[in-house]
Amino acid sequence: MTILPRSVIQLVYLAALIVTPAMAAVDKNSEHATTTFRIYKTIVEMDSSKNSGGATKVANYLASEFSRAGFSEQDVEVIPVAQTSALVVKYRGKADSSHSPILFLGHMDVVEALAKDWERPPFTLTQDKGYFFGRGTLDNKFGIAQISGTFIALKKAGYVPDRDLIIAFSGDEESGMQSTRYLARRADLLKADYAINTDAGGGVLTDDASAVVYRVQAAEKTYVTFEVEVKNPGGHSSRPRLDNAIYELADALKAVQALRFPVMHTPMTLNYLQQTGQLTGGNTGKALMTFANNPQDKAAADTLFSMPEYVGTTRTTCVATMLGGGHAENALPQSAKATVNCRVFPGSEVQEVKATLQKAIANDNVSITSLTDYIESPVSELRDDVLKAITQAVEKRYPNVPVMPYMESGGTDGMHFRNAGIPTWGVSSIFLNPKDMFAHGLNERVPVDGFYDSMTHWKTIIKSLAGQ
């Protein structure tokens, strides 16, 4: 799920002169709206966190909704994968179509939520103070409900697209992505022209609910996690050795802290930083625009390196996230290890990242072992027809709002589809104030008005891309 960076929060306050108010609201009593809300409420109230079995329940429930709406049995599949399930729904296009299918992605699982920590029950959809509260209300059951409700509304209206439209929902995006890997390898899905992901992108609102920008995820950094470990014979703590596993690990981690990977960029990231700089202004805006015009400008690169909201857009990053060592308070440590998580800029190889870490640490006693599979995820340059469709959807709700492609510093299901050769763009229908971003956190919420205002988004995009 897209996590709005602090830079976007700054835009909310610095772009007051260019904000755009929303157009008229959608009829909340329409069949489309009531169906989408029913789906939303039902799936939010299913605990689909890891090991709960809930994602399979969500998949089976959605399958029943699609079947009831007239989708044929052979076009609605619930596929068991490991400890979860995936869902594939095919909206058949014209029989004589020569166009390749379009995929619509989302994930049915959620991160865990401890009820004792929440102000409201996390697995009850609660409407309060203008918001829908509950785990998954944003990430990603909002997207699941919106695209599902749109498919059903179009089907009931008799709409026939000029190509097949295929839903591919995963069941473990928040954990192992086994179902995502399955979907990205299916022969029928690999025939897709491209994929649109409901789990990324979206618009940014100010405090008065005016829109500043709409962001399209066109790339994402993938990640690799390393275990950095030092082993030692150890001994009794009364007889200290000159070499000590904890001290050596500490030195290695200080080297990781000081490490700066080379500056990297793509035309898309430079354009994003240029536009963001123009909207931001001040010294930060100047640094952004300077870097966009000349990525080799050391002063600008150093400024952005010091800012968590921008460093990930300019280079690969590695950071220590977990630590452990020793086995007894009165014994010299026989081992000490740390977890180092790296977010890899598109175009870099995992072996290059590992080699850079080894060179920085410069200690043969320190082993570096990859704990995760690395998934290369190339940039998906935004196509004109897709940009046009997104712009039309945004214009219907917020005229004259700029549409800005960007690179995600985190990861989504989209990485596996890009890796499989399918261009993928994150195109959430939500417009959100950064203050309301609680994905993965306590009291996750979505504005009620934002839920209903999203109803036109997917219809507009689908009809632009697959015929009126």
Image (cartoon, rainbow, N blue to C red):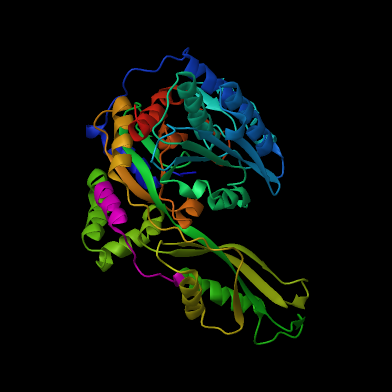
Of residues 267 and 331, which is closer to you in this image? 267
Q: Is residue 453 above or below residue 270?
A: above
Residue 61 counted in the magenta span: no
Q: Is residue 447 visible?
A: no
| Quadrant of residue 391 within the rendered picture | top left
Q: Is residue 367 above or below residue 22?
A: below
Of residues 255 and 358, which is closer to you in this image? 358
Q: Is residue 4 above or below residue 446?
A: below
Span highlighted in magenta in the image? 258-277
Q: In which quarter of the image is the C terminus?
A: top left
Q: Can residue 136 be seen in this view?
A: yes
Q: x, y percentage for residue 57?
A: 68, 33
Residue, x 65% and y 30% (percent of image)?
123
Q: x, y percentage for residue 396?
A: 30, 25
Q: Is residue 270 left or right of residue 175?
A: left
Of residues 131 and 44, which is closer to you in this image? 44
